[in-house]
Amino acid sequence: MISQETIVALASPSGVGAIAVIRLSGNEAITIASKVFQSVSGKDIAKQKTHTIHLGTIVDGEKVYDQVLLSIFKNPNSYTGENVVEISCHGSNYIQQQIIQLLLRQGARMAQAGEFTLRAFLNGKLDLSQAEAVADLISSDNAASHQIAMQQMRGGFSNEIAKLRAELLNFASLIELELDFAEEDVEFADRTQFHELLNRIEFVLKRLIDSFAVGNVIKNGIPVAIVGEPNVGKSTLLNALLNEERAIVSEIAGTTRDTIEDELDIQGIGFRFIDTAGIRDTQDVVESIGIKKTFEKIEQAQVVLYLVDGSLLSEEGIKDLKMEMEKIKNQFPLKPLLIIINKADQLSTAQSQAIDEHLLIINTKEQESPTHILLISAKEKQGIDDLKNQLFSFVNTGALRNNETIITNTRHYDSLIKSLEEIQKVKFGLHSNIPSDLMAIDIRLALYYFGEITGEVTNDELLGNIFANFCIGK
């Protein structure tokens, strides 16, 4: 699959900026660049050392396009493992396109999406999971997703999998060797040590698989549904959280007829807030569709904020609210539910006492996520920081603080599940004393799925699917 062609692409975002970076990679990268670059000192860049930067101009015959900085990275000490040249020019769209077209006329071709990183993988500069982490790093938009991508790109996940795979491969070799001496009935693989290894692999695989639940929501943002009756302040709360007028606020009931979504970073974790249509009986067709979507968003959300207008609460209304919350908890027992009493600045003394008396944490079963009560004033932005802290507490960040490996990639998750299934088959076979040739089949499959993660086992279709999601220039 390794192409001998020299590829070129814009490595910086398209559009006007202070500078732009154009990247070349391939055996002829330096040769092609030398045809269009004139150093201010008259140097021949083909004779310069790797990892050097040179000031000069890009020319096409007598025509000068721009004064640039040209960086040289010679193989194998480059990102792709090939000769790489990066041209830093001024950020004019016209200049960018003229330089790229000039390089194409000199023999380069346009790079495909992710082709630079694909070449880095094919040339052994990155394994497959590290290459995928490059895309995650580029798309990371909060501290947590950035930390996970950096940890994976540095090889933390790869090293853990590679070490387990190497140990399993060693025992697999010994068991395969036993098959060659089947008539002598000898054992080269210590069954006690092998059982200990399988237990250790199973433990690590289960931990990595469990981490996907946290990693997936961190990578994609934690969806939080803001629900409640009309006019309780849902849109005002969204605006207060985002600190901008994102949603229309009106005293007219049913103003929000569709869901409105926006994201907020809270202590490095991305939360995706969803302002929903108010829940009530209505004959309005459009509003009814919005209410239907509200229940869909509750189903999809990781956390539910149930907003109540505190200024309208009576003691009887508080008892009704408690019953309503119990219904929601029965329907979604594992979903964190946060009851927010809005307009706390307008509460009477009697209302405050009734809330303290009746609205206790609703948590009837040990396996349920608790329901919390919080008093705020969305309009006056009182209690918003407390709400953010409460939301952050719902996220299991212990693995992040301890710098543990967290899985965010669905492909890795699928391969880990399959690896675990095969390891458990091997454990069952070892316990049942099945013949070594049958056990060896399950071991080979486990090794295969391990190899899928790091790219030791791969195919053109898999690579095409992965790198097609990259941006051109990376």
Image: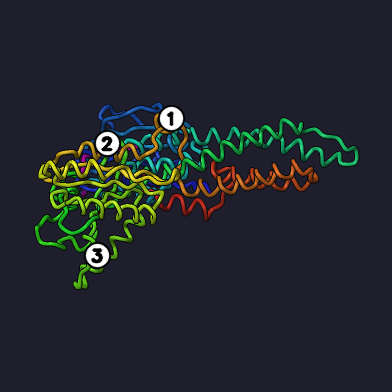
Q: Name the residue under label 2.
A: 389
Indicate the secondary structure of the residue bearing disc 2: helix
Amino acid type shown at disc 1: Asn
Q: Which residue does the numbered mark 1 point to in the structure image?
A: 403
Residue at image position (71%, 34%) is 194
Q: Which one is in front, 366 or 214? A: 366
Give the amino acid at mark 3. Gly
Residues at discs 1 and 2 in contact (Cβ within 8 Å) = no
10 Å crowding of disc 3: few (<14), some (14-19), many (20+): many
Q: What stretch is highlighted in magenta?
A: 86-93
- State which quadrant residue 324 falls in: bottom left
Mark 1 nearby-residue class (10 Å; few <14, some 14–19, many ≥20): few
The image's mark for residue 290 is 3
**Is 237 positioned to the left or the right of 403 in the image?**
left
> How far across and how far down the image is residue 348, in percent?
11, 44
Quadrant for the C terminus, please. top left
Name the foreground residue: 233 vs 454: 233
Q: Distance between the residues labelled 3 and 1?
A: 42 Å
Q: Which of marks 3 and 1 is nearer the N terminus?
A: 3
Where is 377 relative to 251, above or below?
Answer: above
Instruction: Point out the frontmost of discs 1 and 2.
Output: 2
**Residue type of the residue flagged with mark 2:** Asn
Residue 343 part of the magenta segment? no
